[in-house]
Image: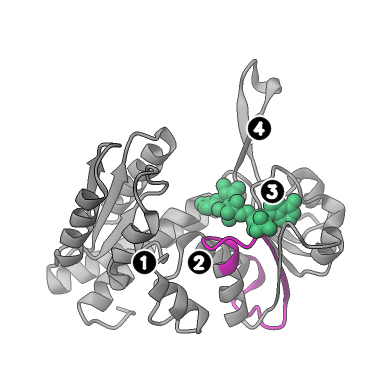
Amino acid sequence: MSEALIIDGKAIAASVTDEITARAARLESETGVKPGLAVVIVGEDPASQVYVRNKGRTAKACGFNSITHTLPADVSEEELLALVTSLNEDEAVHGILVQLPLPKHINENKVLDLIKPEKDVDGFHPINVGLLGSGNTDRALVPCTPAGSVLLAKKALGDDLSGKTAVIVGRSNIVGKPIAQLLLQEHCTVTIAHSRTKDLPDVVRSADIVIAAVGRPQMIKGDWLKPGATVIDVGINRIPAPEKGKGKTRLVGDVAFDEALGHTAAITPVPRGVGPMTIAMLMSNTLTAARRLMGLSEEP
Ligand code: NDP
């Protein structure tokens, strides 16, 4: 079989943000308004701080107004809800993202449900979940990692995914299920597999498109893949890397990448695959939210 295409998520994400930067500049020159993204972080979880910093940096690079609200870990639920309410009412804010996880004393659902659905750039609000599930993607804000994963599949296979068999391994609300909805809308024949699925290797072997969203390092083996399949690996797992030195680690996906290369037509690497797409799609959602809130059509 010819060599597999390694889908360069970093380069594709950069081209998405370049386009968004140009569209945001056009919006500003026509209306004087910059898309505004407010990110709320509670506490000092180092991984969350890195994500939030990257989101803010990318938003600024796209020409957006980027506002970060950092609250102490012991902030009360009432104070956080009051902040979300004020962001809902702020006309300069078009996208609101509350970085998860939240401290245990705060009811996550209560906070996410309070975000105005039109500003819910993470796409986790029940209204957006319902709009996606009922096929109204023109009105929904779609979760970023799922949207980015499907875009990468299209980059490899072309825009028409119609009739392809897709197997998604993982059924979480934030990754597996929304990807299934998006692929259904692309007219794929969709199977969602999970920890109770029987004969998982055989199920995966039936797929033209495999989406791995499990959170188990290198679980999906090369010989589970149908020759010529396209593989989108959403998993991000840190494993020991003694070859890099004592105590060192490295990131791997849910797919045994080196083995998979011999079977697939195209595959995303980890890192530099789905990860960079998540932030790019967040920028896309923020621009979409801004245009909709301003009553403008989606395309400039
Ligand atoms: P969850 O833990 O919420 O869900 C994992 C899913 O995998 C569950 O549906 C679970 O099944 C299923 N699963 C677990 N073990 C097995 C198994 N042995 N066989 C089959 N299915 C199994 O994870 P997330 O969806 O939040 O994340 C998945 C991965 O994606 C993680 O590695 C995460 O780090 C990564 N991620 C990457 C992002 C990015 O930007 N690239 C963004 C978000 C997540 P069950 O429901 O039966 O328990």
Q: Depth-wise, is mark 1 or mark 4 nearer the camera?
A: 4
Helix, strand or loop at mark 3: loop
Give the quarter of the figure containing the N terminus: bottom right
Say which amino acid is labelled 2: Ala
Q: In whole angstroms, how far apart are the C-alphas of marks 1 and 2?
A: 10 Å
- Residue topped by disc 3: 254
State the residue at coordinates (37%, 42%).
103
Residue 249 in which image quadrant:
top right
3 or 2: tag closer to the N-terminus = 2
Quadrant in which the C terminus is drawn: bottom left
Label 4 belongs to which residue?
239
> Circle 1 sits in a helix, a strand or a loop, which is it?
helix
| SS at mark 2 in the image | helix
Residue contact between numbered discs 1 and 2, judged by CB atoms under 8 Å? yes
Q: For the magenta stretch, what is the residue range?
A: 156-177
Residue under numbered circle 1:
285
Mark 3: amino acid: Asp
Label 4 near label 2: C-beta < 8 Å?
no
Residue 124, percent from left and from top? 42, 65
80 or 117: nearer the viewer: 80
Question: In this image, 180 relative to 112: left or right?
Answer: right
Q: CA distance from mark 2 to mark 4?
A: 27 Å
Q: Earlier in the sequence, mark 1 or mark 4?
A: 4
Residues at discs 3 and 2 in contact (Cβ within 8 Å): no
| Mark 3 beta carbon near ligand 1 (under 8 Å) | yes
- Residue visible at 29% across and 65% down in the picture: 114
Q: Position of residue 19 (x, y in %)?
A: 37, 64
